[in-house]
Structure formats: structure tokens, C-alpha cells
Amino acid sequence: MPDSPAAQRPSLTALLMTFNGERLLDQCLSSISFCDRLLLIDSGSTDATGEIAARYGAEIVFNPWPGPKAQLEFGLTRINSGWVFVMDQDEICSPGLAASIKATLANPDALPCHYAPRRSWYYNRFLTHGGWYPDRLLRLFKAGAVELRQSGAHESIHPLAPTGHLQGDLLHYPYENFFNHLQKINAYAQAGAQDLGRQNRRGGIAAGLAHAHARFLKIYFLKLGLLDGRAGFINAVHAAFYAFLKYVRINEGAWGTPYNTLTNDPDPENPQ
């Protein structure tokens, strides 16, 4: 159960978007049990997400998935006062970060918005190069002190008030295995291609190859992903593949169109 709210500090609501999050939800909620309220916006989990949440006294609100930005906006409408700490279901709040959050709330002069560094596990280690760390994200803020934006498949939180920085890390475990990573690459590339298409950006093989090449060089060499060993190389290759897919998919081509409608040949097996 969450700790009782301290008498001299404002309330803190942890806000999570969940969907079939049983893999890490127990550890996630345990790490933020110091929050006064645990609020989960769930888009229809069919695994043990609800049972795990119930063990921690979490409030679960169902909302069909409208997209990342809209879902987070929906969650924020359920919090009218106090502080908000946004978490993903595949993240764990480290003890150092928890202590920093508590100290911030205990300070009556604390700034309204705070960034937290995120450390992500990939393949066999926490990545410390390639632009992955410190991945500073605005996660702790007073209700009403932020605005939301979306680019491609990702939403982002932006401050409307002065900001500070928390100590300690969010520990992020985004992928279960290679298969799961490729599933996410596929989904993100599709959303990214659609976003680029709405901007009338040009795609195709040449653009895909150019962006893939540039992305690999940036992550592996310029941002020193090579220092993360095998994990750094695999990550850079996957990032390049994502960039290629995103740009080549701007033009979807004619998948599934019968051959004869493309050639005006009524019978491709017996051309006239």
C-alpha cells in the first residue's frame, strides 16, 4: 500500500499508462509505493495487470487507447492538485531517485517542474553512450504546469514553469528480447512514416539509406555507442534499420494490388 501522506508536504500522484504490463509492473509499483496515490490509465489489459495493481491499492481507470498523447492527457484530467510523477510500466524508480523526489516535495520553495535521468537496459547492459544516457525526461511536476506534444509515435512533456533536475535514475527495461524490439521498431516506423507523410516529406530508398547511414554514424561513432560493446553495435544497427523503414514507408507502394490491375493485362498467366 502507498505510504500515508506526510503532514507537511503536498500530495503526490504517480500516473502510469498501462496495457498488459505484468512483466515489470510489480517492481514498478513497489518502487513508487511512497506516492500518496497510484493512478493507472489502462487501455484493456488481459494479463495480470489488474491483479498486480490491486495489491498496491492502485486506482485503475479504463480508457480505450486513443494514442500516447491523448491517453496521457486523459490521465492528467484525473489529477486536479498536488504533484504528478509520470512513470512507464517498464520503468523502476531507483532508491536515489525516490529520495530526490521526497526531498523536492518537502521543500516549500521547490521549482514546479523537474527532469529525471533515465538509464535504459539493452541486450546485456545499461547503455551509457549512443545518446541513451542521461536521457533526461520531464517526469515530476505540479498539476497544470506542463503541456503535451507528440511527434510520430512518441509524446513528450514540456514545462510551462521553471525547471529543476532530480538526482538518481529511472531504470528502464524497454524490450523483452530481439523479437519484441523489432515489433516496436515496426510500430514506431509506421507511425513515424505517417507523421512524415503528413508533413509532405519525401521518402524512398535513397532517403531511407541516407537517413539510416547517418543515424548509425551518429549513434555508434559521434555519440560513442561503440563504447557500449556488442550492445552498442546492435543498438546502432537497429536504429539505422528503423530510420530506413520510416523513410521508405512514406510511399506505401501497391501492396496487395493484383498484378493484372497494374499491367492492364486481364490474365497475367496467359498474356495476349
Image (cartoon, rainbow, N blue to C red):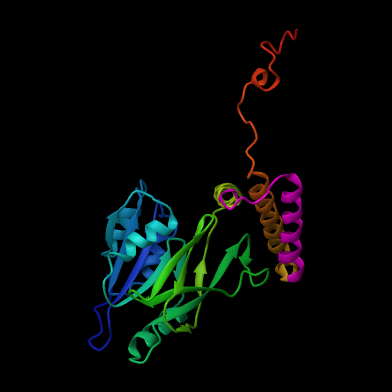
Name the residue located 65 percent from the left edge and 70 percent from the top edge.
131
Residue 122 vertical position relative to residue 251 in the rendered view, above or below: below
Q: Quadrant of the N terminus?
A: bottom left
Q: Is 5 on the left-hand or right-hand side of 64?
A: left
Name the residue located 66 percent from the left edge and 47 percent from the top edge.
245
Q: Quadrant of the C terminus?
A: top right
Expressed as whole percent of the image width and height from the top left, the position of residue 127 reads: 63, 68
Name the residue located 42 percent from the left edge and 77 percent from the top edge.
160
Please report the bounds of the magenta region as a residue range.
197-222
Q: Is 185 on the left-hand or right-hand side of 113?
A: right
Residue closest to the eye, 265 or 127: 265
Expressed as whole percent of the image width and height from the top left, the position of residue 100 reads: 43, 84
Residue farthest toward the front in the current orientation of the protein: 200
Chief SS of the magenta region: helix
Magenta stretch: includes residue 212:
yes
Q: How many marks?
A: 0
Expressed as whole percent of the image width and height from the top left, the position of residue 195 reads: 56, 52
Magenta stretch: includes residue 219:
yes
Expressed as whole percent of the image width and height from the top left, the position of residue 122 reads: 61, 62
- Find residue 5 and report its image quarter: bottom left
Name the residue located 56 percent from the left edge and 48 percent from the top edge.
194
Residue closest to the eye, 114 or 225: 114
Residue 133 vertical position relative to residue 64 in the rendered view, above or below: below
